[in-house]
Image (tube, rainbow, N blue to C red):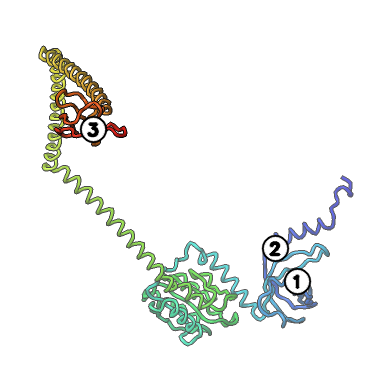
Amino acid sequence: MSPAQSAISVSELNRQVKTLLEQGIAKLWVEGEISNLARPASGHLYFSLKDESSQIRCAWFRQRQHGPTIKLKNGDQVLAFGRVSIYEARGDYQLIVEQLEPAGEGELRRRFEALKKKLSAEGLFDEDAKQDLPELPQRIGVVTSPSGAAIRDILTVLKRRFPSIPVVIYPTLVQGDTAATLIANAIATAANRNECDVLIITRGGGSLEDLWSFNEEIVARAIHECPIPVVSAVGHEVDFTIADFVADVRAPTPSGAAELVVPDQAEWLRSLGAIAARIAQLGRRYLEEKFQTVDWLSRRLTQSSPAAIVARQSDWLRNLQQILIGAIRHDLAARARNVQNIRFRLLQRSPAIGVQQSMQRLSALQQRLSGSGRSSVDRLNVRLRLAARTLDSVSPLATLDRGYAIVSDDETGRILTDAAKIRPGSDIRAQLAHGTLQATVNETDTGKSNDS
């Protein structure tokens, strides 16, 4: 290949160098003097670390900055922790800083890292070896200074969250040359007395030197050997000690440790109330199921008893008896209906029935004849009454009823209609509507003038 074909770009070269640096060199601490310090408006810090013969560019980005940085100035001797990288745009080799400390703590920091590495290799930090905290401890032990602020914070939180749990304090110094031995002895005492369910090792915040007693190997091994679950609450949230890594649980602050070891009493009581209600409900359901089982078994026992068997057989016999009686009654009723039908047919063919039917027909004919005679008589009566009314209308008797009379000659019986034909002195008879009159004619009046 020609040189032009095998060449790579500057950007690609810087990218490969960056990859080699970041993957090939682990994070590390670097000690040096600050120079060329720059504070742009972005909040990032850029400076160089140098010693007698060399220097390296450094970048400390704002997101990684914890604690005060305003006091940093050129000439400060510091310890910088970070990873080696390269700024590709300029090809500058640099250290990306994650933590920065004054160089006065450098020796302690190196001892800290060395002990941390050693104990980690021995397995003192393994998660498998860590114990779970009790859900509700019967007694809480605290290894700390009895006059420090840490114990006051812990007692205040415990009183608020669960005041009924007793607290045992194992007093010790937490700072100074003998503090580490005293702390280890206090842990051993708590382990030997075995009167607590959980042990809090704590002190308030301070510098690395102030917290160094909790970075000693004797304390770390005492925590590891303690059979009681240990909570480490040393310093503030940003402070880490060897005790934090060895302990079963690390709390960010003493108050946080108290929050971890006990539940909230109100919430606990609510949970207990809910559990009690659930237990009562389950108990009621269990009893109801058992009651039902007893009832079922009782029914089965009752049904399986000789008396129940005899009673069921008696019921069965009674049912069969009722069925038999019903069948007999049905058969008898059918036979009775058959007899009635035969009797009816026999009666229909009986001579007496024929005679009775003939008599009924004769009676019907007689009734028809009698009715026909009565009808004829009724018609004749009607005609007679019509004739009588006609006769009455022309009868002299009707005239007599109106005050007229029929006069006849008493001797001859001839009806007199003309006064001129009767002589005075003749006897006459006057027929009235009711009775007759005998009279003698004294004189006559023919209706003509001068006649007598």
Residue 397's spot in the image, x, y percent?
A: 22, 30
Tell me where residue 181 appears, x and y as whole percent.
48, 80
Q: Is residue 367 above or below residue 250?
A: above
Residue, disc 2: 25
Q: Is residue 133 left or right of residue 443?
A: right
Judged by depth in the image, the label closer to the viewer, 3 or 1, is 3
| Amino acid type, callout 1 | Cys
Question: Is there CB contact under 8 Å for labels 2 and 1?
Answer: no
Q: Nearer the viewer, residue 416 or 440?
A: 440
The quarter of the rendered structure image containing the N terminus is: top right
Which residue is at 40% across, 80% downward? 168
Q: Which residue carries the number 3 mark?
A: 444
Residue 298 to residue 260: above or below? above
Q: For the residue labelled by badge 2, is the local secondary structure a helix, a strand or a loop?
A: loop
Seen from this angle, which residue lies furthest bottom?
A: 147
Q: Give the answer, above or below, for where 144 lies relative to 356.
A: below
**Hey, which quadrant is residue 366 in on the image?**
top left
Q: In the image, what residue occupies the spot 37% across and 64% down?
A: 275
Residue labelled with disc 1: 58
The foreground one among 207 and 45 is: 45
- The amino acid type of the residue labelled 3 equals Thr
Residue 361, position in %: x, y? 17, 15
- Residue 185 appears in the picture as rendered: no
Residue shown at 69% from the left, 71% from the top: 63
Q: In terms of sequence position, does the residue under pointer 3 or pointer 1 come before the other?
A: 1
The numbered mark, 2 or 1, whose residue comes first in the sequence reads: 2
At x 70%, y 59%, the residue is 23
Q: Amino acid at mark 2?
A: Ile
Q: CA distance from mark 2 to mark 1?
A: 16 Å
How many tags in the picture?
3
Measured as percent of width and height from the top left, residue 103 is found at: 68, 79
